[in-house]
């Protein structure tokens, strides 16, 4: 049986030695033969060690100087939540994109289940749209950080409430799990009355390269715009796979809706769309004070016609 700290060490090792170090053989040691990949930002990924080796080779071949930083990592039981950033310069072809010489910083949020010392299941979101735009392979459209001229990195953790990421928890894991779910569900409406009780609205800080939002005003405006574009939007948090450690939580959600209103300049298509989204949340004083978010905006933008490929 794998302990929580051992699970965290396995995931950190995969990032440090596999992604950054290019140790492909490591996959046969710590990736389960039947590992299930639930999402990878719109990329097609094979199952098991060979699928993960192919994925890393694709990235490391295109970005030979690439390195993956582990920006934060939490664990509960056998489930690990992680924030990463891939840094690299494209000098070779990448998914058919000619070498551009461009440097990219690609943020991501993931969940990995570690069983008997091996990664057996994973969910991942990354800012694929921002990266493709940075490489000149996709029209510069949408509200993301790259499209609006902002840094595509996470930025520093807020200390406005006198705490850091490692600040002491002020609630139980179950209280934080409940708060995280209520936050995700209220934001989906958006229910501003409920949110005012769940969020430190004045001090809230957002890190969202995929949406370009930085504060609560931007987050709530984006939520209203999303609801107007998808009037029947349903956001379903994966309650069975929420990670809580200390004053932080990671929640993965599935979003579905009908494109019935204008969305980022794209006329309504009437199409049913589905995409995924992950929130990495920090709490203080019984409220959400900070969020890091990634989402499969590539699939969303393709389905709604904002970028080619739908």
Image (cartoon, helix red, strand yellow):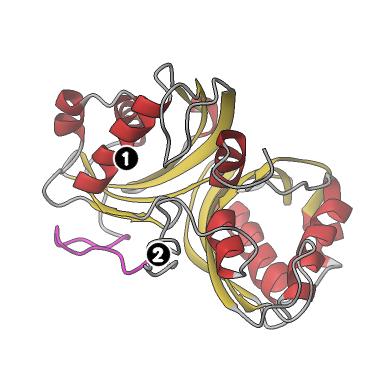
Mark with earlier residue (2, 1):
2
Name the residue nearer the viewer: 93 or 290.
93
Residue 90, percent across and down? Answer: 68, 77
Can you tell which mark lies on residue 154? Answer: 2
Question: Which residue lies at the image location 14% right of the left edge and 52% below the top edge?
Answer: 203
Name the residue nearer the viewer: 242 or 140.
140
Is residue 181 among what the camera can see? Answer: no
Q: How crowded is mark 2: few (under 14 residues within 10 Å), some or many (20 or more)?
A: many
For residue 310, above or below residue 70 = above
**Of circles 2 and 1, which is in front?**
1
Provide the major secondary structure of the magenta segment: loop
Residue 22, percent across and down? Answer: 77, 74
Question: Which residue lies at the image location 45% right of the left edge and 64% below the top edge?
Answer: 146
Q: Does the magenta stretch include residue 276?
A: no
**Number of numbered discs visible in the structure rendering:** 2
Can you tell which mark lies on residue 14? Answer: none
Image side of residue 254 versus residue 148, left or right: right
For residue 155, above or below residue 11 = below
Q: Name the residue under label 1.
A: 222
Is residue 89 among what the camera can see? Answer: yes
Q: In the rendered view of the protein, which quadrant contains the N terminus?
A: top right
Dot 2: element = loop
Q: As drawn, which residue projects farthest toward the top?
A: 232
Residue 102, percent across and down? Answer: 61, 79
Q: In the rendered view of the protein, which quadrant contains the C terminus?
A: top right
């Amino acid at each position: 049986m794998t302990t929580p700290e051992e699970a965290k060490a396995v995931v950190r090792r995969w990032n440090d030695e596999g992604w950054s170090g290019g140790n492909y053989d490591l996959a046969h040691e710590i990736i389960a033969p039947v590992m299930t990949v639930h999402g990878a930002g719109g990329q097609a990924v094979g199952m098991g060690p060979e699928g993960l080796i192919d994925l890393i080779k694709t990235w490391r071949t295109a970005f030979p100087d690439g390195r993956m930083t582990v920006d934060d990592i939490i664990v509960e039981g056998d489930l690990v939540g992680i924030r990463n950033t891939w840094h690299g310069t494209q000098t070779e072809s990448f998914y058919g994109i000619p070498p551009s010489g461009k440097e990219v910083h690609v943020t991501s949020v993931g969940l990995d289940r570690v069983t008997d010392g091996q990664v057996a299941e994973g969910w991942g979101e990354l800012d694929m749209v921002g990266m493709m735009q940075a490489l000149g392979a996709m029209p510069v459209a949408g509200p993301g950080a790259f499209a609006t001229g902002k840094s595509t990195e996470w930025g520093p953790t807020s200390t406005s409430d006198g705490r850091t990421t490692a600040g002491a928890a002020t609630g139980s894991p179950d209280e934080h799990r409940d708060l995280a779910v209520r936050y995700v569900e209220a934001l989906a409406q958006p229910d501003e009355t409920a949110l005012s009780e769940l969020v430190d609205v004045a001090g809230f800080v957002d890190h969202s390269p995929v949406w370009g939002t930085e504060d609560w005003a931007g987050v709530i405006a984006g939520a209203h715009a999303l609801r107007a574009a998808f009037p029947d939007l349903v956001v379903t948090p994966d309650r069975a796979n929420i990670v809580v450690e200390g004053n932080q939580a990671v929640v993965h959600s599935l979003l579905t809706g009908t494109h019935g209103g204008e969305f980022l300049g794209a006329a309504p298509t009437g199409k049913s769309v589905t995409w995924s989204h992950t929130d990495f949340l920090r709490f203080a004083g019984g409220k959400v004070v900070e969020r890091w978010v990634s989402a499969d905006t590539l699939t969303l933008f393709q389905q709604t016609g904002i970028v080619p490929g739908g």
